[in-house]
Amino acid sequence: MKQVVQNYKSGELALLDVPVPGCKPGGVLVRSAYSLISTGTELMKVSEAGMSMLGKARSRPDQVAKVMQSVAVNGVPATYRKVMGKLDSYTPLGYSLCGVVEQVGTGIDDVKAGDLVACAGNEHALHAELNWVPRNLYAPVPDGLAPRHAAFGTVGAIAMQGVRQGEPQLGEVALVIGLGLIGQLVAQLLTASGVRVVGADPDPARCELAVGLGAAACGDPASTAVENAVAELTGGHGVDQVYLAAGGGSNQPVELAARLCRDRGRVVDIGKCRLDLPWNAYYEKELDVRFSRSYGPGRYDPEYELEGRDYPIGYVRWTERRNLACFLDLAARGRVDVEPLISHIAGFDDAVETYRSLKDGDLKAVAVLFRYPGQRAEETGTPAPPTVAVPAVRRGSSGGGRARGADAPVRVAFVGAGNYATSMLLPQLARRDGVALSTVVTTTALSAANARRKFGFAHATTDLDAVLGDKSVDAVFVVTRHSSHAELTRKALLAGKAVFVEKPLALTGDELAGVLAAVEESGNDRLQVGFNRRFAPLLREAKGKFGARTGPASLRYLVNAGRLQHGSWYLRQDSEGSRFTGEGGHFVDTASWLLDADPVSVYATGTPGTDGGGDVQVVLRYPDGATATISYVTTGAAGFPKETLDLVADGKVLRLDDFVRASVHGPERWVSSRLPKARDKGQSAEL
């Protein structure tokens, strides 16, 4: 299928052939009829991509701060690879569309194949022929509402959430600053609520459009027309609410809001404009400044958006899905009219040229729609299903691997292509002789296409079963989120593949039992878990310098894991396990390798905390009486090294400082040189 993508490093726009996404449980596969270009948000992203690296950094200081933190923890080379990997990848565009349900995932009972739905989300309602959309990010389209109008659902929900934040009441007067797509919809929603609207925008055509759709008056904010209209409509008191729907670097909208708002009025920020609040003006009027977060409650909450957990209506009346459905209802009943906002409808095959025309200013538009194959130019009902070509994937019967000659390369498939796979594993394998990267499998179409482009995979797909059934594939790498490791490993073993699975192998005893049962059933025990630290060159050299032990040892391992960003999938303890469950195996394995034995007993305790259980202290005892204490902490200083280790025995001490420097103190002292390039934690030697 085709999808609109952009390379954020080069600015390149492309209509890319990507694999068809799979239909996962808890959502639906939707064939697009119309998708809407957000002429504000998307064009800002397109413009940023065309900037120099310095310009990108200036436009996103929040991302620069993250990069600097990563440098402190991981070093410059590793951070550089990670950042360049992200920048030099295709990213999706789009977040508002209407389409026909192609396939229904398990657990979905409110729509069926053939139903028309409006979809939301910058990861799910993309400019692509097919999208997988989770339950809370789609809503059925009411009868009689044209698909091209239903494609406005997401931006309509954004405007509606902004209006809700303003708490308008009948008879009030509101000022809308910025009459682009969101501003026009805000003005219409306010008018439908019995509020008189004054609009401010330097574009006369947009002012005229807003007046034609119900605004009481509109004008250039630099002129006196807006101030005069506000004075006349409010008796000189000022407006009850101001909605900031403008973008750009000017502080004029914020200053105009303070000047024209009444005492104790409300200012709602919907767009992304400069917000240097003039303190005196806002203080003297005691203005209430509010922010409107996207489509409504549920936005950025993975449990709501991805897992389909709705908020009880008695506690949260208007969620993002209910806002979406409400806007569609208003449009279907004619209370909101989006047809006059449509400046241009482009065929999907012309997507790249359409973006260029918008960016260069050749196409002046409030709203632009992409029409997908199979849509008639003037349709008003449910679109006829087009034929979408699904890329062929080589299939074979499940079972053992093919007979391979001694000189034939090992054919490798990757399941998952996230940050770790693309920054730590694939760069090593892509340049290794005797390895052929056969197929990459991901749940999202674009990540598979990116991995294929960057690392030279022969095939990219979202169909795992087809890969496991391909006899030409020798080995499967499982590099996905923790909760899927055990099941994917089990399937790959039963298919007769050699398997590398990134830690952890399993999250529960039952999951581990399933893997062991697969080994027993298939007779295939070619399984490696990704414990790479025992392969780190610096640690191996230090162990050699320490020499053989004659007495018991004491080992202390401090892991300064640090806090995670809000929303990180690592914090989804119910589904992904605690942080120590996911990462702690690294440190148990490293300690056991250094002590040349497996532990015979364990004691662990933890402190309360929100980061997957807080700090964890683990004491391991070994057959010869040696002990290892692992302190896994999330409450330490960000600037302190992540991993420090001390091994004490026989009058000697081995010290490892975060894979940058190591030393051995004893009868003879050895100190490594500081590594000139990067921390090598053993991935290359492990592979």
Image (cartoon, rainbow, N blue to C red):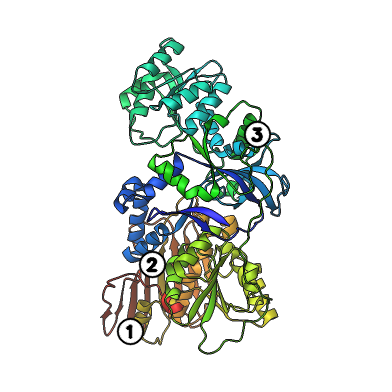
Q: Where is residue 69 in the image (x, y as percent from the top left)?
A: 35, 56
Classify 10 Å Cα crowding around label 1: few (below 14), some (14-19), many (20 and above): some
User: Which callout, 3 or 2, points to the residue nearer the camera?
Assistant: 3
Q: Is residue 102 left or right of residue 566?
A: right
| Element at label 3 | loop
Q: Position of residue 310 (x, y in %)?
A: 64, 43
Front position in the image: 7 or 674: 7
Q: In this view, does 514 lie to the left or right of 537?
A: right
Q: Is residue 306 left or right of residue 552?
A: right
Q: Position of residue 589 (x, y in %)?
A: 48, 75
Q: What residue type is labelled 3?
A: Gly
- Image quadrant containing the N terminus: bottom right
Residue identifier under label 3: 314
Pick out the residue farthest to the bottom. 406
Pick out the residue farthest to the front. 377
In three-dimensional space, the C-alpha distance between marks 3 and 1, rounded to whole angstroms, equals 66 Å
Front position in the image: 35 or 200: 35
Residue identifier under label 2: 643
Residue identifier under label 1: 545
Classify 10 Å Cα crowding around label 3: few (below 14), some (14-19), many (20 and above): few
Q: What residue type is labelled 2?
A: Glu
Marked residue nearer the N-terminal end (3 or 1): 3
| Element at label 2 | strand
In three-dimensional space, the C-alpha distance between marks 3 and 2, rounded to whole angstroms, equals 47 Å
Front position in the image: 303 or 598: 303
